[in-house]
Every structure is written in C-alpha cells, then in structure tokens.
Image (cartoon, rainbow, N blue to C red):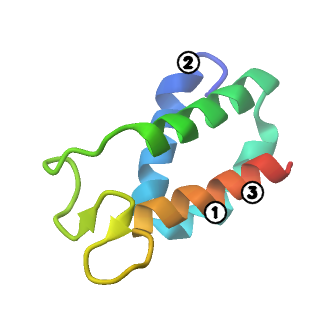
Amino acid sequence: MTHNNPIIILSVIIDQIQRFDNFISVINDALKYLSPLAYDIVCYTILHALTTPISPTSIPSYIDGKMSRENATPAQWFQNLCVLSANVFKK
C-alpha cells in the first residue's frame, strides 16, 4: 500500500503514533516490509512532525509544544515520536 503513495500513508501513520503509544510496536514490525524509498519518507515524516510548529487548535489543550504544562516531562506525542525514531534509525 505504501509503494504507490508513501507520503500520504506514512503521514497518517506518524499522526496516529503521536496520539496512541500502543501502535509503536505494531508499526515497528510492519516497517520491515518497506522499500528503501519508504524508509527515507519515514525519516522525512518523523523530522517534519518534530519540526512543525503545533497550533493550539490541532492538538488537545494539555499539550504545550514538546513539553507538558503540568511538569517538566516531555509531552506524550513527543515521547512517542522519539521511541519510533529510535526504533527506525536503529535498523
């Protein structure tokens, strides 16, 4: 499915990983079937998600950028992307 238009599919996957941390292991297992071009696009979409400014209307109010408002811990979406990128770049 990702061979025809990997940017759209992988953007949706990265978006879902930012919201739900239980997808990381499943997606990590599925990524081993990607082509080399799709791996490059995974890297691009992860970097794009990490560097794109987040508007307050697109995310829940409890997330303030890369750090959570309540304490000095990283926001959940940021942790999820970091775990996924560590798994992807390890391969």
The alpha-carbon separation of the residues under discs 2 and 3 comes to 23 Å
Q: Which disc, if any, is residue 5?
A: 2
Quarter of the view holding residue 36: top right
Q: Position of residue 32 (x, y in %)?
A: 81, 44
Secondary structure found at label 2:
loop
Judged left or right of residue 75, residue 83 is right
Vertical placement of residue 27 versus 5, above or below: below
User: Given the current orientation, which residue lies at the most extreme top position?
Assistant: 4
Task: Report the residue at 71% width, 49% height from top.
Answer: 30
Q: Position of residue 44 (x, y in %)?
A: 59, 30
Q: Which disc, if any, is residue 87?
A: 3
User: Given the current orientation, which residue lies at the most extreme right position?
Assistant: 91
Marks 1/2 in contact by CB < 8 Å: the verdict is: no
Task: Report the residue at 20% width, 62% height from top.
Answer: 60
Task: Report the residue at 23% width, 55% height from top.
Answer: 59
Q: Is disc 1 surrounded by few (<14), some (14 to 19) or many (20+) residues within 10 Å?
A: some
The residue wearing badge 1 is 83
Q: Is disc 2 surrounded by few (<14), some (14 to 19) or many (20+) residues within 10 Å?
A: few
Q: Which disc, if any, is residue 57?
A: none
Judged left or right of residue 33, residue 79 is left
Q: Position of residue 58 (x, y in %)?
A: 20, 47
**What amino acid is found at the position of numbered circle 3 in the picture?**
Asn
Q: Is disc 3 surrounded by few (<14), some (14 to 19) or many (20+) residues within 10 Å?
A: some
